[in-house]
Image (tube, grey):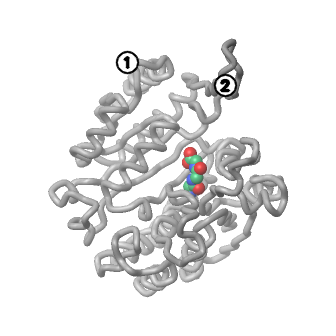
Amino acid sequence: MKIAVFAGDGIGPEVTHEAVRVLQALDLPGLELVEGDVGGAAWRKHGHPLPEATLEIARAADAILFGAVGDFECDHLERHLRPEQAILGLRKALGLFANLRPARVFPGLEDHSALRPEVAGAIDLLIVRELNGDVYFGEKGIRTLDNGERQGWDMMAYAESEVRRIAHVGFKAARGRKGRLCSVDKANVLETSQVWRDVMIEVAAEYPDVELSHMYVDNAAMQLVKSPGQFDVVVTGNLFGDILSDQASMCVGSIGLLASASMAEGTKGLYEPIHGSAPDIAGQGKANPMATILSAAMLLRHSFGREAEAARIEAAVAAALADGVFGGDLGGTYGTTAIGDAVLGRL
Ligand code: GGG
């Protein structure tokens, strides 16, 4: 049970530390934690955000627990040296193409000010974000136009095979839930989205028990705010999924609560909070580690089949929230360590 732990930048080390404490408290047989450098922290030490040594640790591990990357002090660097290239590089190198981002309202948070109580109880959705394609990985550059202006460009592309494999993940997930899959695209404007939609319809024929619907991304953003309870599984591309899942996090209270699993064809997975490095609160002991603790639960479930332990962690987080253990992100006063202690005490 070899787990690579890549804490990264900003609040990454603080929140990852709490998730590791939770994993260690479970007394899992054969648990081995191997740390590696990523992001701005790795660039400072090794001159690269994803050093070869870190990639080796990742390849040798059964699963990866990832904190966050992002560092303003690296803004001047060329793109391939920026901290974010660590997570993008890991996703690409390990073939992690499917990102599962569940969002549900924990008991005790229904009346939280970030929510509308009348819709809160109904929210239990899963965003399936494609992770290896789209503008993220297309060719890109900055060129000079004839009039002397600089023009930035990013190529957006999706091959049928890339859409097909994420479609299967979405349909299978919907099959294990309420049986509804909403595919989000921008097919009225983008050719990539037309291919995306065509493939979704083709794959749907293999899942007659799943109800497929389509939504333009602008409408999906609006519907998420208006009536988030209508969604079961949402499958979408890399960029739209990145944006919509941050939005979904505020439907359930805070981005500090959303965990994620990034999956490959095999069993290896990378697990991380959906939030970034939050440099404004880094090192102050203020960050909410629950999203990372919940990511550790997803790690145990998806990479090791340890459903009982995963459920124990999730129940402990839910119990802490029900008892009012709120971090600053939820308007409370609990700090990072206190939240970790509260979850550990309820395990
Ligand atoms: N834990 C998530 C994280 O560190 N995010 C920073 C980031 O730049 N992510 C890129 C992405 O998810 O698309």
**Residue 301 position (above or below residue 314):** above
Seen in the image, is 123 located left or right of residue 263? left
Name of the residue lying farthest toward the left: 118
Seen in the image, is 195 located left or right of residue 332? right
Residue 304 position, x and y percent, is: 57, 62
Name of the residue lying farthest toward the front: 147
**Residue 311 position (above or below residue 120):** below
- Residue 10's disc is none
The one nearer the camera, 181 or 103, is 103
- Mark pair 1, 2: CA separation: 29 Å
Please report the residue visible at 30 percent of the width from the left and 41 percent of the height from the top: 179
Please report the residue visible at 30 percent of the width from the left and 66 percent of the height from the top: 106
Mark nearer the N terminus (1 vs 2): 2
Seen in the image, is 311 located left or right of residue 150? left
Q: Residues within 10 Å of mark 2 (few under 14, many from 20)?
A: few
Residue 217 sits in which quadrant?
top left
Please report the residue visible at 72 percent of the width from the left and 41 percent of the height from the top: 79
The one nearer the camera, 2 or 154, is 154
Residue 175 position, x and y percent, is: 35, 42
Q: Secondary structure at mark 2?
A: strand
Label 1 belongs to which residue?
188
Residue 334 position, x and y percent, is: 41, 81
Seen in the image, is 197 located left or right of residue 306? left
Quadrant of image for the C terminus? bottom left
At label 2, the amino acid type is Arg
Please report the residue visible at 42 percent of the width from the left and 18 percent of the height from the top: 189
Residue 310 position, x and y percent, is: 46, 68
Is label 1 or label 2 in front?
2
Q: Secondary structure at mark 1?
A: loop
Label 2 belongs to which residue?
150
